[in-house]
Amino acid sequence: MVGYEYYFTNKIKEDTTLRAYNFNAGPAAVPLPVLEQAQKELVNFKNTGMSVMELSHRSKEYEEVHNRAITLLRELMNIPDTYEVLFLQGGGSLQFSMIPMNFLQEGKTAHYILSGAWSEKALKEAKDFGETRVLASSKDANYTHIPTDYSLEDIKDGAYLHITTNNTIYGTQWNEYPTSPIPLIADMSSDILFKEIDVEKFSLIYAGAQKNLGPSGVTVVIIKKDFLETARTNVPTMLSYSTYAENNSLYNTPPTFAIYMLSLVLEWVKEQGGVKSIQKNNEEKAKYIYDAIDNSEGFYKAHATEDSRSLMNITFTLPNEELTKKFLQEAKERQFIGLAGHRSVGGCRASTYNAVPKEACEALANFMTEFKNQN
Amino acid sequence: MVGYEYYFTNKIKEDTTLRAYNFNAGPAAVPLPVLEQAQKELVNFKNTGMSVMELSHRSKEYEEVHNRAITLLRELMNIPDTYEVLFLQGGGSLQFSMIPMNFLQEGKTAHYILSGAWSEKALKEAKDFGETRVLASSKDANYTHIPTDYSLEDIKDGAYLHITTNNTIYGTQWNEYPTSPIPLIADMSSDILFKEIDVEKFSLIYAGAQKNLGPSGVTVVIIKKDFLETARTNVPTMLSYSTYAENNSLYNTPPTFAIYMLSLVLEWVKEQGGVKSIQKNNEEKAKYIYDAIDNSEGFYKAHATEDSRSLMNITFTLPNEELTKKFLQEAKERQFIGLAGHRSVGGCRASTYNAVPKEACEALANFMTEFKNQN
């Protein structure tokens, strides 16, 4: 038997459904109980006689879903009242432009630390709006680690400092965040909610939902109110953070179904015991796979240096192209999905986001060891 | 019994589900067979062992969904190969800025015909990007009709002419579209696919999906290739139509689940016999309600003048506030949802988008007549 099977525990009893071992980099695994809940109420949401996606975004029923998502995120991340929680569209990629559009004031410089392809893209968009500076970069090392060779003394007059906390492609992740003298902005698209963090270190956190928060189509922005007040005002309505803050992200029709899914994912995180439990789980999950790499006598090589290893995306290579191909083929036959590495790194990548079950990581580690022994 | 009940015809047999009479202005009704299909495969899409929202947007399985939606829309609307079909985010509201950002060239004027609140908003955003002109407006008549008092001779050197084909708030709709000497751009958010149209009259058509196309969270753009070539190039990546055209709307992660729902809605339209059948159906649906108004001896008054009546949003008032309140209360008790008019018009509004069943419109007409007779 491949994958793992389960029987619906709800009303839908006739069906047996195969679950793949989903290691996709994003869109990625969603917790099974969340999918089951969404399935159960897809046609008739809380006895409204409508699907949640058929509700008016001005209805009481939808507003409860919307506000529940905000309340849960505040609770789970311990977000103070001095911050707004906003729902936008366009993914992290639109944030790359919205941030300088709103916060790169004339005469100031935006500082970027480059730790991978996504931070490069963020920088590229900022260049259209004003002065930028690369404060540090590990590009020369093919982004095997998070840069450490920089001084925060240099940036005192800057508009903001931008970092990417986890690098999906390279499999690296920041351990500790800088204490920045200027507003710190973080792209947490691929590791938001993976562990407890101190939100107050940041002026703006953004994250596309499709890794740790649910389906694609909604972007979460957590923004400090006094930072928001410094935003430029000559910004198109839909590209101004103030529009979302002033209207509880209901200026126009939000992506209601995606926000509903987000609310279910957050309920699930809470049921797991909150972010602390999720973190412990993530550490155990990653350990299975990193152990399989470290105990392989060099058969598997991690792309990331040990101090920068990501708990979300584990990147590794095999001795040669041929074995990599064989590995991916055999993995596929066993229902391991999404293991091919990004073309800029090659090899393999296992994305072990919050919703990926421990069982899947253990199974992958076992398969890796088995494959190594046979090849 | 209120509303109408149905039994699942698929595997999920135990459940009896109440369906409301959904007259929401958007997000709005989705065809029941579409919701049932989505429900059936929500946890396990086509035996992948994953939900469609867990698939990588680079996977073969997702790309099939994505391309199927494009192919179906091309087929149903008879869109020539000289046009691109794109999927964006941010709703119609983001289009209000993207259009002038891409197409309002320096030294040119963008012409707007104002037929309601949404065209006003579109104009407002354009003003930030260059010269604009109101070619015609029915604002003085509280937007009871589509303006006709303009000459297209005047606009020969303009950048583009913008119209809103259907006005959700006021319940008015264009019958025939102008033959414009400059690129014609249309916001069809609330009436795309409601009848057969000649796409070639337009250089750009845009529509948020949440009325006739599915859930909120995806915006469809149909753009003429040679018009796209005239776009400004100094536009942020995510706000440039070229980015979507060059990458088959897969430059970054698209809202995959919303596009999947769109593909199911389009399959449903095809199964109904295509847009011609949908149109016939829409005409019959609207007739029930307009007849109830016209035969009420002045008890109900339509907001729109007869030549501008919308088949999508039917707006009407009652003799006084008290009766309006009573009407809405009794309607609610009978599971008619979304009938309160917008505050700028008052009274009532019934949105009869493609997915609203004829049965619901007939029931509403009967209720209106009954209410009138009793009051």
Image (cartoon, coloured by chain):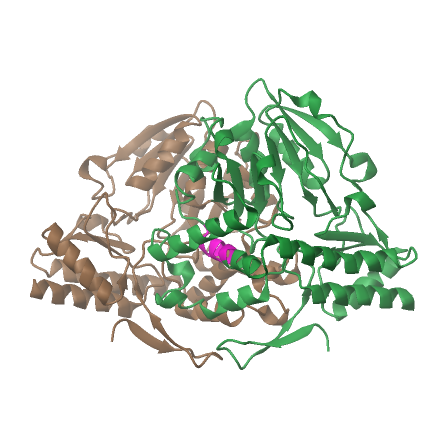
Chain colours: A green, B brown
Residue A292 placement: quadrant = bottom right
> Quick one: B221 or B23, which is closer to the camera?
B23
| Residue A186 x/y as whole percent | 62, 38
Which quadrant of the figure contains the C terminus of chain B? bottom left
Above or below for A173 versus A256: above
Q: Is residue A276 above or below residue A82?
A: below
Picture quarter with the N terminus of chain B = bottom left
In the image, the segment drawn in magenta is A255-263
Q: What's the magenta bit mostly, secondary-structure-wise?
A: helix
* Residue A216 position in % (x across, y down): 56, 53
Q: Is the residue A15 above or below the residue A134 in the image?
A: below
Residue depicted at 32% across the width and 28% down the height: B154
Q: Is residue B180 visible?
A: no
Q: Position of residue A331 (x, y in %)?
A: 78, 66
Q: Position of residue A40 (x, y in %)?
A: 47, 70
Q: A218 left or right of A360?
A: left
Q: Is residue A130 above or below residue B348?
A: above
